[in-house]
Image (tube, coloured by chain):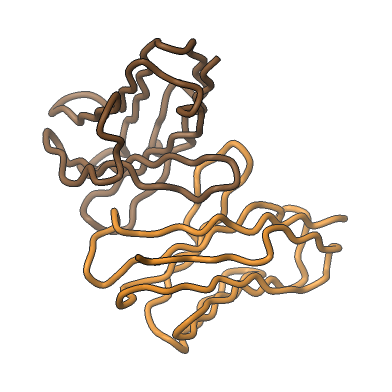
């Protein structure tokens, strides 16, 4: 059983471009969480999704950021018109229920 | 607002030199306190969950303890492979995992 798969592992975008981060949860997991980690800062919750539903997006910036978890396929975190401050490591975690999730290896986004 | 403070920020130990990492927390009713290990470029890896003051859990050279205000991660006779950042996190009684607050971590380096 493969773990939580995130791709790409590294992503470089120029300011103003769009970034799409993908997360394939573990088999049988229907709950997905997205986090952002900045150097010297803790993991910050962004959004919690179940299949086809956003359950809690209280940690997501109101503009430029969106997330989805369709019935088929991976969960996507989308950042439009990226700025330098969006540079960070983005982690996805998945669980079969609302219990403790497993984390993926992360996507490191660099905005140049 | 829930808070987690970890100390020290960084710790350098000789192989075999035992020590403790501290996690001080304030939370509106504790559902659980988590310890994770994070290697460079990787996602957090779950170590322990503690639920109530006085509880202890052990895994190999690691032992986690919990009081009403703090948790300690004791490392006995560490080896170089224990080098990593150790994260502490708390979940309030009133929320799901998306309400978990993470500390900024203690970066442990074990020198051979």
Position above or below: A44 against B56? above
Colour chain A appears in: brown
Within the image, what quadrant is residue A18 found in? top left
| Chain drawn orange in the picture | B
Q: Residue at the location (40% across, 31% down)?
A: A5
Q: Residue at the location (61% across, 45% down)?
A: B39
Q: Residue at the location (44% across, 34% down)?
A: A90
Front position in the image: B80 or B93: B93
Classify the position of the C terminus of chain A by image quarter.
top right
Q: Residue at the location (72% across, 53% down)?
A: B81
Left or right of A52, for residue A88: right
Front position in the image: A7 or A40: A40
Front position in the image: B43 or B59: B43
Position above or below: A48 against A68? below
In the rendered image, residue A94, in percent from the top left (x then y), is placed at: 31, 44
Classify the position of the N terminus of chain A by image quarter.
top left
In the rendered image, residue A41, in percent from the top left (x then y), is placed at: 54, 48
Left or right of B103, for residue A47: left
In the rendered image, residue B84, in percent from the top left (x then y), is placed at: 66, 52
């Amino acid at each position: 059983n493969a773990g939580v798969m995130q791709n790409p592992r590294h992503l470089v975008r120029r300011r103003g471009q769009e970034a799409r981060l993908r997360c394939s949860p573990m088999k049988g997991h229907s709950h997905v969480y997205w986090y952002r980690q900045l150097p010297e800062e803790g993991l910050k919750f962004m959004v919690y999704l179940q299949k086809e539903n956003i359950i809690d997006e209280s940690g997501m910036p109101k503009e430029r950021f969106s997330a989805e978890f369709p019935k088929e396929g991976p969960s996507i975190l989308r950042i439009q018109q990226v700025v330098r401050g969006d540079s960070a490591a983005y982690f996805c975690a998945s669980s079969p229920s609302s219990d403790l999730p497993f984390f993926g290896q992360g996507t490191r986004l660099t905005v140049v | 607002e829930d808070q987690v403070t970890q100390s020290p920020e960084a710790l350098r130990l000789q192989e075999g030199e035992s020590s403790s990492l501290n996690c001080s927390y304030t939370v509106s009713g504790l559902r659980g306190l988590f310890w994770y290990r994070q290697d460079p470029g990787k996602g957090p890896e779950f170590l322990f969950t503690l639920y109530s003051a006085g509880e202890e859990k052990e895994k190999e050279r690691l032992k986690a303890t919990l009081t009403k205000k703090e948790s300690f991660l004791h490392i006995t006779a560490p080896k170089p492979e224990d080098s990593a950042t150790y994260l502490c996190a708390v979940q309030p009684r009133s929320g799901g995992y998306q309400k978990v607050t993470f500390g900024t971590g203690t970066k442990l380096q074990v020198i051979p």
